[in-house]
Image (cartoon, rainbow, N blue to C red):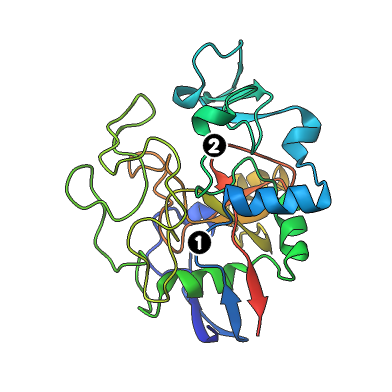
């Protein structure tokens, strides 16, 4: 991949996220892993290097409330987004907390609870790097140009058109799992895009190399950015996205998080220069 690419959109759904305008870019040739890095792949890295993720070192991570393991110890809700819980012992091995490995860990699913720092360490180990936002969007478009999704412009729904792993139902109370998954799906599931890449939207948020920046004159947006200083861009949305709440399973959609943050819906993929 490489050459002329597109970044952003002229039809922003969440303009305060910095989705607009549509820009044209020039990209050097690169290769991208066809799916997000899986648990098996990350396990090989951890065993070879002895690497401990930041969630393992901190001793906790964030898990969505309905995905907590049965009998989980008391958790702490996040103010304003109470469906996120701080769970002791949650990490890429024990996805919903201590002792949950056998219930929630699947070899071919994306590794989650991975921070930006963790993702970069893995990418260095395999001789690659994290993609830029422009590279990520170019790859996600799959050769289709200015489209909303990797498959075109048709909007997923809750019943019939289910091209990716997102939420179906009433967020955050009820997920009817019409797409077959309550949490992550295998990395190589659903139909790949025109470049043969799987799950470029939905499933897990994916880290990029870029800092999270927005060009805006709005006072509220500038204040928000002050609180996000040092944050990195994530792309693609996750299994928790729904049009009614987090309509970010679009190519131009973006969010930011601190490089040491970890959750049960954050993963990554790797690119290599050609």
- Residue 106 in the image, given as x and y percentages of width and height: 51, 41
Which quadrant holds residue 134? bottom right
Which element carries disc 2, helix, strand or loop? loop
Q: Nearer the viewer, residue 12 or 183?
A: 183
Q: Is residue 190 above or below residue 79?
A: below
Residue under the point 68% across and 54% down: 232
Query: Looking at the image, is mark 1 or mark 2 nearer the viewer?
Result: 2
Residue under the point 36% across and 39% down: 181
Residue 230 seen by the camera: no
- Residue 122 in the image, given as x and y percentages of width and height: 73, 57
Q: Is residue 165 above or below residue 150?
A: above
Dot 1 alpha-carbon crowd within 10 angstroms: few under 14, some 14 to 19, many 20 or more: many
The residue under label 2 is 105
Distance between mark 1 and mark 2 Cα atoms = 17 Å
Quick one: quadrant of the C terminus? bottom right
- Residue 171 in the image, given as x and y percentages of width and height: 36, 31
Residue under the point 37% across and 66% down: 192
Which quadrant holds residue 141? bottom left
The residue under label 1 is 35
Look at the numbered discs 1 and 2 and tell me whether their residues touch, using CB distance below 8 Å: no
Q: Nearer the viewer, residue 224 or 204?
A: 204
Which element carries disc 1, helix, strand or loop? loop
**Furthest-bottom residue in this view:** 3
Dot 2 alpha-carbon crowd within 10 angstroms: few under 14, some 14 to 19, many 20 or more: some
Question: Which badge, 1 or 2, comes first in the chain's sequence?
Answer: 1
Total of numbered circles in the picture? 2
Q: Is residue 157 above or below residue 31?
A: above
């Amino acid at each position: 991949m490489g050459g002329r690419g597109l970044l952003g959109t002229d039809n922003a759904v969440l303009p305060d996220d910095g989705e607009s305008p549509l820009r044209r870019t020039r990209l050097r040739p690169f290769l991208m892993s066809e799916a997000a890095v899986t648990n098996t792949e990350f396990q090989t890295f951890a065993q070879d290097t002895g690497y401990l993720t930041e969630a393992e070192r901190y001793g906790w991570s964030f898990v969505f409330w309905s995905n907590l393991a049965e009998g989980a110890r008391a958790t702490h809700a996040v103010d304003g987004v109470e469906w996120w819980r701080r769970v002791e012992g949650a990490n890429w091995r024990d996805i919903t907390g201590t002792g949950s490995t056998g219930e929630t860990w699947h070899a071919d699913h994306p590794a989650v609870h991975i921070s930006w720092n963790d993702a970069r360490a893995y990418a260095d180990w395999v001789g690659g790097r994290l993609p830029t936002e422009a590279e990520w969007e170019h790859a996600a478009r799959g050769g289709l140009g200015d489209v909303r999704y990797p498959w075109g412009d048709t909007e997923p729904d809750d019943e019939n058109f289910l091209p990716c792993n997102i939420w179906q139902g009433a967020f955050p109370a009820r997920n009817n799992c019409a797409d077959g998954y309550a949490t992550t799906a295998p990395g190589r599931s659903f139909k790949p895009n025109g470049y043969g890449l799987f799950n470029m939207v939905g499933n897990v948020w994916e880290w990029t190399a870029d800092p999270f920046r927005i060009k805006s004159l709005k006072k509220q947006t500038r204040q928000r950015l002050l609180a996000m200083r040092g944050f990195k861009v994530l792309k693609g949305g996750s299994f928790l996205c729904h049009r009614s709440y987090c309509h970010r399973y679009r190519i131009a959609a973006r969010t930011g998080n601190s490089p040491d943050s970890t959750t049960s819906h954050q993963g990554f993929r790797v690119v290599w220069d050609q």
